[in-house]
Amino acid sequence: MTTEKFMTIPVSHFVVFSAILFLIGIYGILTRRNLITVLMAVELILNAVNINFIAFAHLSPFSAEVSQIFVLFIIALAAAEAVVGLAIVVALVRNRKTILTDEVNLMKW
Amino acid sequence: MDQLFVSLTGKVQEILASILPDFLDFLAPIALPLLGILLFAPFVMMYLTWLERKLVARIQNRIGPNRVGPFGLLQPIADGIKMLTKEDVIPEGADRFMHFLAPAVIVAPAMLTWAVLPFGRNMIAADIAVGVLYFIAISGLAEIAIFIAGWGSNNKFSLLGAMRSIAQMLSYEIPMVLSVAVVVMMVGSLSTSAIVEAQSGWGGFNWFIFRPWGLVGFVIFFLAGAAETNRTPFDLAEAESEIVAGFHTEYSGMKFALFFMAEFISVFSICALASTLFLGGWQGPFLPSWAWFFLKTYTLIGVLMWFRGTFPRLRVDQLLGFAWKGLLPMAFVNILSMGLWEFVPRPWNYVVSTSLLVIAFFLIVYGNSSDLAKKRTYVLAD
Amino acid sequence: MLDKFVYIIFGLSILSAIGVVAFRNLFYSALSLVAALFLAAVLYICLQAEFIAIVQILVYIGAVMTLIIFAIMLTARINDKTIRASNQQRVVSLIALVVFGVFLVGQICKAQWPQVTGVNAMVPIGRLGELLVGHFVLPFEAISAILTVALIGAIVIARNK
């Protein structure tokens, strides 16, 4: 699988694909009631952004290195955020006995 | 003789390249290694079950299977026929799709890890630049399969066994990765064939097991690998004397055989990776390279079976305590000791790193002394 | 050949992503997320970023998904058909996102992207290591601090008082 065989996919196709994944993730955040599904949709968004970065790596040798380093940092941050998010979910279940986003509305007017 | 399989692969590749149509020509270089792994892995697993039953039987002062063929050699085939003809029971409330999916998802990563093992000189299926990291990542995929199995069985004990098994696998991944990191630091490359090349020369004394950090790293990797594959003494989740068999309680017939197969294939690949990283891979004087590889791997597998016949099982809190409070600090100190070994001038480097490891070992044992078993004192009735 | 393969991976990824947000059964959406992440790793391999692909499998699937599935098992009522899986904003957000999506995809296709001409995007791992402790040492140290803080914070939040 050489570079020449690969280059026939224009980079805009990758950007469209990652935009579609991003929008599906946003749909998940806006509509799902279960908090854990919302967290999974956030992971989907971060994944879409990673794909975008790696697709742009072909622009120049410099951008290949920078995009891979950036993706490493995004993966590490996503892991940290999933950990804290799930700790909050566990604490929420213990206190309010619910994980539905509709029912966690103490501060709403 | 040494390059027998390599030349065989070359000939088959030429034949295939001439007969395959144009859009399938990427298959030609990888067809024979792929088929080799797919056909060889179940064969290895079958005779590993035979070896285990014979060895453990001899340790327990009995003979083991000896009726089905000379020395019981056809016993695995009889077992296979039995497994295939058993009724496939699916529990009533179980999720059929997940119950069906779990055995497939657990066998696939076990076989995928064989792609980066150097079976001999130039005999590696996929010589990628990140070989060792690929091995560790793919063996982490088995955890998802255990979840699917445990949840899909609709059985509280299955779920509990699955969660214990996953906690064990996660805890032991960290010392395993750290002990591999020591070898990678020394070699400077993640590729398994480069690691084997770096241990060449000096008539075998360049193998990493003969260095102080290598010996400790080998022990940590071996114990962590045994725990990863749920072997005794770490097999609380699926032991034979427990009431239920853990996450594969509700499986019967061919699906259970697939779980069993995944376990033995992982055992082979962990021992093969241990011999690659620490024992010099396929290097050795007279025999062909692949013969040395299998000799070393099967010696390590024999040691694991020896463990099974000899050691009592660990309780689950002892299991997790051993990983987090015992192996993990030792793995960190091992990395430090390797760094010192590399930079302190000879011959003092052996002294410095060995003394650091010994001091750390005694400190860890002292620090864990409240958990270790105390010597029993017997008061006899008079 | 590789192009058709990449388009198939695109299609499967979009299907798994829809599976994540559409399944009522929480475990099925977790499995769809595992599939989506695995397909993204395959895509990285096609894009010559092998190290990132393996880190994705190791960290995202091996650790983050295991954590999410543990949390699902410990806290959720998974297949209760009386609980609606999506809230009232379903139709509105679907329409809004479809409109926005059409606009966004249109603008992306109209834009002038730089033409990539056979640049070798393969970064040797040694070079990544050099960059991490050389040019990018500040983000590297910052992310180590973030991971430590996240670990301690998660334990503190989820602790049984």
Image: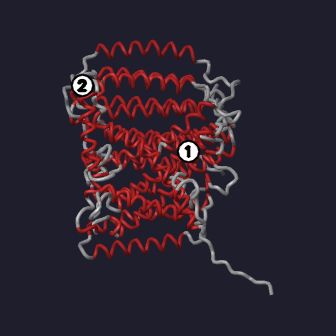
Q: Which residue occupies the foreground of this view, A78 or B175?
A: B175
The residue carrying pointer 1 sits among few (fewer than 14), some (14 to 19) or many (20 or more) residues within 10 Å by Cα, namely: some
Residue B315 position in % (x across, y down): 63, 60
How did the renderer colour the structure? secondary structure
The residue carrying pointer 2 sits among few (fewer than 14), some (14 to 19) or many (20 or more) residues within 10 Å by Cα, namely: some
Q: Which residue is mark 1?
A: B80
Under circle 2, the secondary element is loop
Residue B209 position in % (x across, y down): 35, 66
**Is residue C135 at least partly visible in the picture?**
no
Q: Quadrant of the C terminus of chain B?
A: bottom right
Count of labels in the image:
2
Q: Nearer the viewer, mark 1 or mark 2?
A: 1
Residue B295 position in % (x across, y down): 38, 60
Q: Which residue occupies the foreground of this view, C26 or B249?
A: B249
Q: Could you tell me which residue is drawn at 23 percent across and 65 percent down?
A: B201
Q: State the image quarter where residue B35 is shown.
A: top left
Q: Is residue B25 left or right of B59 when viewed as pictured?
A: left
Residue A15 position in % (x across, y down): 34, 23
From this view, report whether residue B280 is shown above or below residue A96: below
Residue type indicated by callout 1: Gly
Residue type indicated by callout 2: Met
Q: Which residue occupies the foreground of this view, C32 or B343?
A: C32
Q: Which residue is mark 2?
A: A7
**What whole-number distance in Å separates the C-alpha atoms at marks 1 and 2?**
49 Å
Q: State the image quarter where residue B22 is shown.
A: top left
Q: Which disc is residue B5 wearing?
A: none
**Is residue C110 at least partly visible in the picture?**
yes
Q: Is residue C65 left or right of A75 when viewed as pictured?
A: right
Image marks 1 and 2: residues in contact by CB distance under 8 Å: no
Under circle 1, the secondary element is helix
